[in-house]
Image (tube, rainbow, N blue to C red):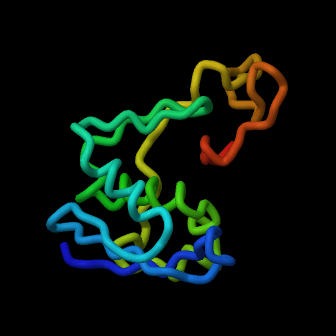
């Protein structure tokens, strides 16, 4: 693995693209994007990292080295990076990589066949914190 630079729009700076520099070998992240300090804090936590939210259950085993898990950190910083045209702007280490698996939180509603409905138990739509495809 190598050092990978992702230019990601930064919402705190008018969506100006700012660098996130991920050293996959060292398991570190640097850069001027406003989410870098938060990413550094996540990477410094003991593993596995509980990256769950109200809408998902997710434990990251090695986000500093695993592209599928690091992709969660990028999506938290700017979720449109998961879709085109931004997705194709990611470094080649992410080619063909999907987010590491997560489980919808128990409060995510399912239909009679067990499929996700896209809503929480209180009727609110699932938010970006629960990014997944409702195929």
Q: Is residue 3 left or right of residue 128?
A: left
Q: Position of residue 85 (x, y in %)?
A: 64, 79
Q: Residue at x 33, y 50 (%)?
A: 41
Q: Position of residue 129 (x, y in %)?
A: 61, 44
Q: Is residue 96 visible?
A: yes
Q: In the rendered image of this protein, does residue 57 appear above or below residue 91? A: above
Q: Position of residue 121 (x, y in %)?
A: 76, 19
User: How many numbered marks are there?
Assistant: 0
Q: Position of residue 36 (x, y in %)?
A: 41, 64
12 or 4: nearer the viewer: 12
Q: Residue at x 70, y 42 (%)?
A: 127
Q: Is residue 4 left or right of residue 120?
A: left
Residue furthest to the left in view is 26
Q: In the rendered image of this protein, does residue 26 appear above or below residue 19? A: above
- Quadrant position of the N terminus in the picture: bottom left
Q: Quadrant of residue 4?
A: bottom left
- Quadrant position of the C terminus in the picture: top right
Q: Is residue 135 visible?
A: no
Q: Residue at x 25, y 48 (%)?
A: 44
Q: Is residue 121 left or right of residue 39?
A: right
Q: Residue at x 50, y 80 (%)?
A: 18
Q: In the rendered image of this protein, does residue 127 appear above or below residue 124? A: below
């Amino acid at each position: 693995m190598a050092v990978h630079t992702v230019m990601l729009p930064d919402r705190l700076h008018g969506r100006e693209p700012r660098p996130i520099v991920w050293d996959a070998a060292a398991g570190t992240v640097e850069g001027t994007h406003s989410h870098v300090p938060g990413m550094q804090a996540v990477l410094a936590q003991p593993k596995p990292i509980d990256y769950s939210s109200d809408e998902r259950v997710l434990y990251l085993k090695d986000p500093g080295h695993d592209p599928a898990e690091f992709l969660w950190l990028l999506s938290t910083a700017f979720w449109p990076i998961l879709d085109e045209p931004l997705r194709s702007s990611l470094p080649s280490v992410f080619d063909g990589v999907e987010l590491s698996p997560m489980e919808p939180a128990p409060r995510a509603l399912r239909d009679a066949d067990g499929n996700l409905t896209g809503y929480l138990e209180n009727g609110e739509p699932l938010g970006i914190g629960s990014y997944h495809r409702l195929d």
